[in-house]
Image: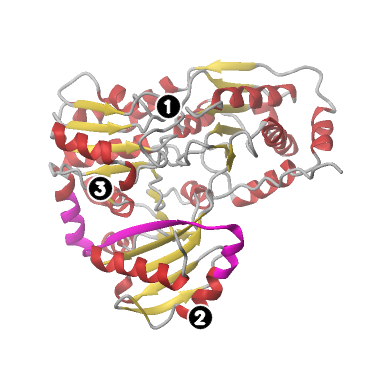
Amino acid sequence: MAKKPLQIKFGTDGWRAIIDREFNSDNLQRCALGVAKLLKDGGISEKGVVVGYDTRLNSKESAQQVAEIISNDGIKVYLSENPVPTPVVSFNVVKHNVAAGIVITASHNSSIWNGFKFKSANGTSASVEVINKLESYINESPDSLHTNNQAQVKKPAPIHTVNFSQGYIDDINESLNLSMIRQSGLKIAVDSMHGAGSGYISTLLSGNETRVLEIRNNPNPNFPDMQQPEPIAPNLKPLRDFVKSEKADVGLALDGDADRLGILDEKGEFLSTLNTFSLLCLHMLDTKNLRGPIIKSITQSSMIDHLAKCYNIEIFQTPVGFKFIGPLLSKHNALAGGEESGGYAFRGNIPERDGIFSGLLFLEMMVMTGKSPSKLLKWLFSKVGEHHYDRIDIPLADNQVPLLKEILVEKASGKIGDLKVTKVDYSLENGVFISLEKGYWALIRPSGTEPLVRIYCEADTKSRTTQILINLKNILNIKD
């Protein structure tokens, strides 16, 4: 009996799988054919597709395979000549006015993973409706999908191998006041985490008083000395040590495909992703005096709500995943959009997460205010009150997921730590949101990209946040 094909499911950002197991040539072919069918059925295939890839094992070869399959379906392809960040691919979707973009990347996942991201015509993550349709095409019978796609194709369309980077660099130069940063004399430490973002910030800021010192800037698909190329505190010890030894003014870290940003202050202390996004929004609203809605995921900071009241702007809240945030950025001409993962987007750039642009925006904030990162954080807290955030990730089998809500329905009431529970929202598709007194919160949800359960919390002190996380882990009785 023939083995049933894997049901390919896109998570919060694309499809990801283990290299040489589920991530294989057959499943890549299905994904590529599904994209071709989606574009043909939508009547937009003549515009073509952009294909890029990161520094992971076999990413280049996988991108070439995808490009050839789509070309053989009569759809022209612009293929990156080198590994590039995901935001660079998104920029080239817009630049070349194509119907869609594909990125071969597993983003921040560990080295054993690779993946397939799909971008819409405006460069952002495709909407839930589009992804659902794409999944249905991918999961058709492979033989019938191939036959239907090839029915009227007479000859392959061209594959154009293109330098994706230069146009992106030129656009960033026009979008931000980089000359001010170049002349500031800052000493900036950058950790590219052996990923596709290597060299971009140093290239953009070269040629004046500012110094950019880069570590882990050689591509390495094994991502040594880290759990995974995710710019969070446990993975940034080399950057922390480097900031201290070089007496750098700030440390910037990019994830494997450079769509996420992590920041260390001048003392080597990690700024949480919620603090970072709140600071960047404060910069847009106060220093730059801009106005517009902010889109935030449910895991983003309540500080954003405080800023919205201070500056009289509207907030839109979404589930986790940029496939929810991205479409709203364009629809509402939003000022900013961000999620807890360290992925942020801002007006003036593509409506997609961009760790490089976000890092430069933070540097602009430092120069325009004349404040160090630690002083910027004090300024933020003076406006919205002190907030501290943390997250723990625990391995979780798929069959344990349905038990989470059952346990929490029974036990998540009364108090968590020493804060009163004011509301528990069980209506989320995959998680449980716990509202605490004083506007603080916790969330328990399975990851959309890895076999983990994530427990999030934001409260007014580090110790309280840590205690709430421990209490929730004990309630769930999950062993790590």
The furthest residue to the right = 1
Q: Give the crowd class for mark 1: few <14, some 14-19, many >=20 residues within 10 Å.
A: some
Per the image, the residue denoted by label 1 is 220
Q: CA distance from mark 1 to mark 2?
A: 46 Å
Residue type at the position of mark 2: Glu
At 33% across and 50% down in the image, what residue appears?
273
- Please indicate, yes or no, whether residue 112 appears anywhere in the rendered image: yes
User: Please, what secondary structure does the residue beneath circle 3 have?
Assistant: strand
35 vs 19, nearest the viewer: 19
- Please indicate, yes or no, whether residue 300 appears anywhere in the rendered image: no
Pick whichever of labels 3 and 2 is earlier in the sequence: 3
Task: State the scheme by which the image is colored.
Answer: secondary structure
Q: Give the crowd class for mark 3: few <14, some 14-19, many >=20 residues within 10 Å.
A: many
388 vs 123, nearest the viewer: 388
Q: CA distance from mark 3 to mark 2?
A: 36 Å
Q: On the image, which quarter does residue 471 sit in?
A: bottom left
- Residue 84, compared with residue 161, is above or below; it is below
Residue type at the position of mark 1: Asn
Q: CA distance from mark 3 to mark 1?
A: 24 Å
Per the image, the residue denoted by label 2 is 410
Part of the protein shown in magenta: 376-403
At 39% across and 33% down in the image, what residue appears?
224
Question: In the image, which disc is placed on residue 243?
Answer: none
Please tell me whether mark 3 or mark 1 is closer to you in this view: 1
At 70% across and 19% down in the image, what residue appears?
157
Residue type at the position of mark 3: Phe
Residue 58 x, y percent position in the rendering: 56, 26
Please tell me whether mark 3 or mark 2 is closer to you in this view: 2
Pick whichever of labels 1 and 2 is earlier in the sequence: 1
Residue 419 x, y percent position in the rendering: 31, 77
Answer whether residue 398 is magenta in the image: yes
Answer whether residue 149 is magenta in the image: no
